[in-house]
Structures are given as structure tokens and as C-alpha cells.
Amino acid sequence: MKKILVVDDEQSMRDFLSIMLKKEGYSVLSAERGSSVGEILKKEVIDLVISDIRMPDVSGIDVLRMAKDIAPETMVILITAYASTKTAIQALKMGAYDYIIKPFDVDEVKLIVKNALDKKRLEEENIYLKQELKEKYRFENMVGASVKMLQVFDLIKRVAETSSTVLVSGSSGTGKELVAKAVHFNSQRRNSQFVSISCGAMPEPLLESELFGHMKGAFTGAHSSKKGLFEIADKGTLLLDEIGELSLSMQVKLLRVLQERQFRRVGGTEEMTVDVRIIAATNRDLQKMVDDGTFREDLFYRINVIPIQVPPLKERKEDIKILAEYFLEKYNSEIGGKVKKISEETLTLLEQYDWPGNVRELENVIERAVALEITDVILPERLPEKIIHGRMDSDGFAPKTKIPDNGLDLELYLDTIKKDYIQQALEMTGGVQNKAADLLKMSFRSFRYYVKKFSLR
């Protein structure tokens, strides 16, 4: 419930406004003297002050000054019986939302109050969203503690202070778009648009229209003119993801925009000028594409002003535990905080896997494990088989694995592997233990011992 403070030296006016506003669903306080407003604002969170401009002790202008000094987010509306244009202009310049002259229309007052509170709500939402974005994409909050990622964070910090074009390279799933957003939201352009497009996700005619816009009638189906992403991102940042997928003809058109900062909408003749920071991203080797003649050399040098290479997860395995625990917290909150931690055996398996899908694959694995886990600890059984068993060699055995820097509980690890294979054998043989034992080349006695040890059925 929004809280409104009515300030007027006339009892009848205070009572009238209080009754009217309470009927509209607002919480209302009232004050007879303007001099008491300061103390009220210090004790109460007031959304709107409605004050008479002429009072014996402190004027409405003084009330406005107090509100802006003590609670600048509070809206102020002034009321007077005197149609003083000079005072009205002074009040508006000082930050009053509006100015009402007595006698006033009740419906008009209701509408002005509603509009003032709507404006305050939108301002609060805007501040919250900007802060949320800033916090979400602060480079300090990106997950990772490895030397390679710390180097990336440092580079983001220095790059963000410039307007230079950036090329973010790395395998799929490493977080290239997150890096691009971190650059934008830590730059002077943070209050303008961040726009992204996948250059490999659409055919060339549609991509050209998306980037540069089009005029009405430019092609079949163009029933109205449309802004392109370059116009939308003016004063902001445009991420060109998968830039290595551009055709040679589109590369020429993009190069012109980067060189001249001008373009034409499809079907248009007017030259449009924009101020856009370009960040390109790719999982391909653009230098090799230049050598092969499939990517223009001049465009490559134009976008490769500041390169940022995002390392694959297999090259920063010390980050796996941090990332896994981060994703555990993220998805655990969605199911009521049931899962508390990840077992050491599970972490060992995660750290031994090569993660071809990088951070995105790890996130999917943890999300799946959290959803399937029935205890309060993520156990190895909740992991996909390819992670539990690793990649098999030609003889059907898991390859040699490197012992983690923090060591390995070999007995626990081997028990995890044994338990999973025995469970699979039982499932494959319909629970017939002697057949399952033959499948694993074990004696029935040994097989039955491990079934009992691991409480298998």
C-alpha cells in the first residue's frame, strides 16, 4: 500500500484529502505544520507528499526542499489557491511532480496522484533492473578462480573502459556471451541497449534486414518500415555471435558499417549514422578462415582489435568445483533447498571428465542431478554414464585418469565404479544374479558379496 503524507494548515482540507485518498486504497498520514515534515520523512517511508504551498510556519516550497534533501525518491505535489505562474515554475524546476490550483476537480487530483505514484514505481523498477543487470554481469561475479579466468576478468575490466571493438573466441558453451555482457555492463554504455544476434541462425536476406532494418515495400511481406539492430543498439553494444558464419557478401556490408559507421536500410536511400560498440564472438579459427579465403582479412583485422580468448573448461579444471557448487545453489533454490552439497566422489568424477560441452554441459549435468537426487547429497549415481565411466578405449576399459591435485580416495572411487557396473549387470539380466556375475566375469560368491555390500536389488 502506497503511503501519502498530506500537509495543510486547514483541518477541513486535511480531512477531505485523507478521506478521498483512503477510499482510493492509499495509506494516509497528515500534518498541520510544514515544519513537522522533516521528522516524519526521517521516520516513515513516504511515497508521495501533497502540500499546501501557503502555510503560516513553513511554505510548500520549503516542504519540497526538505523532501528532496531527506528523501529524494519521494514525489511531491503542491496545492495553492493562488495561480502564481512564477511559483509554479519554481516548484517544477526544484523537482515537484505537479502543481494543482484550488478549487480543484476531485477526479483530476485522483489522476495526478495515480500518475505520480506510477512514475515513482517505474523509476524504482528501472533502478532495480539496472542494478540487477550490473550485479549479474559484474566481472568480479563471474564464476572462476583459475589463473586463466583471472586473466580474462582483468582483460574485461580494462577493455570495458574503452570503446574498442572486441573479438571473443572460445569453444561452444564456454560463456562468450556472458563475457560480452560483462564488457557492456561495466562500460560507459551500460545504460543503453545491449543487443545480440546469431549470425549463423538465419538466411542472408533475413539477417541483412535484422541488422540494418528495411523500408516498407522493400520485399514481399515488408508491410511496414522496421528498425534494424544497429539502430536499436545506438549508443549501446551489439554482439555479433557466430560471426564466422557470415557469407562473403554480408562480410562486405558489415565491413562498410564498421569503417564508416553508416548504413542504409534494405530498400532505403537515406544514410543512417550510428554510434555502436561492436563485440564479435566465434568458436571458429578466423585466422585459418582468412588463410582459406572464407573470411575477409580486412574484416578480421577490423574486429580483432582486442581479442579475448575464453579457455575451455578442461583447461581450468580447478574451476569445476566452484562452478558445480554455484549451479547447485542456483537450481537447489528452485526445489526448496533439499540438496545440501556434492559428494567428494561425485566431485572427483566431475573433475576427471573432459567436458566437451564446457560450462553449459556442466550446468545441465548439475541441474539434472539436483532434479533426480533423493538424498541431501548429490551422489555419483545421479551423473550421466559417460561421466561415471569416462571414455572407453578399444578394449572397453576406461582410459587412465590423472590423480587430482587434492588427491583421490581410491577405495571409494573403485567402489563407485563397481556398484554402477553391478547395478547395470543386474538390470541387463533381469535381476538374475548368476547371469549378472557371468557378464562381469566374477564368481557368484564375489558378486553376491558386493550386492549385499552396496545394498543392491
Image (cartoon, rainbow, N blue to C red):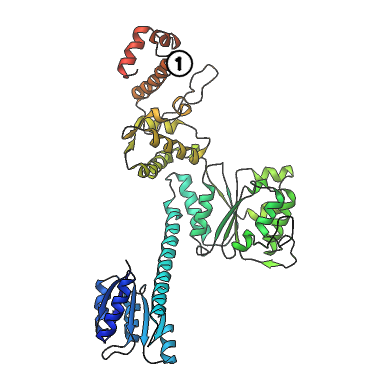
Q: How many marks?
A: 1
Q: Residue at position x 42%, y 45% from top?
A: 145
- Residue 29 placement (x, y as % from top left): 26, 75
Q: As rendered, which of 398 and 428 lies closer to the eye?
A: 428
Three-letter amino acid code of the residue under disc 1:
Met
Quarter the N terminus occupies = bottom left
Residue 94 shows in the view: no
Residue 288 shows in the view: yes
Q: As rendered, which of 142 and 15 lies closer to the eye?
A: 15
Q: Residue at position x 39%, y 36% from top?
A: 371
Note whether 72 is above or below 332 in the view shown: below
Answer left or right for 33 relative to 355. Answer: left
- Residue 126 placement (x, y as % from top left): 44, 64
Q: Image quarter for residue 262?
A: bottom right
- Residue 163 placement (x, y as % from top left): 57, 62
Answer left or right for 390 relative to 296. Answer: left
Q: Image quarter for residue 269?
A: bottom right
Q: Which residue is mark 1?
A: 428
Q: Image quarter for residue 71?
A: bottom left
Note whether 200 is above or below 429 in the view shown: below
The crowding category of the residue bearing disc 1, from other C-alpha atoms within 10 Å (few below 14, some 14 to 19, many at least 20), is few
Note whether 71 is above or below 258 in the view shown: below
Note whether 257 is above or below 412 in the view shown: below
- Residue 154 placement (x, y as % from top left): 48, 53
Quarter the C terminus occupies = top left
SS at mark 1 in the image: helix
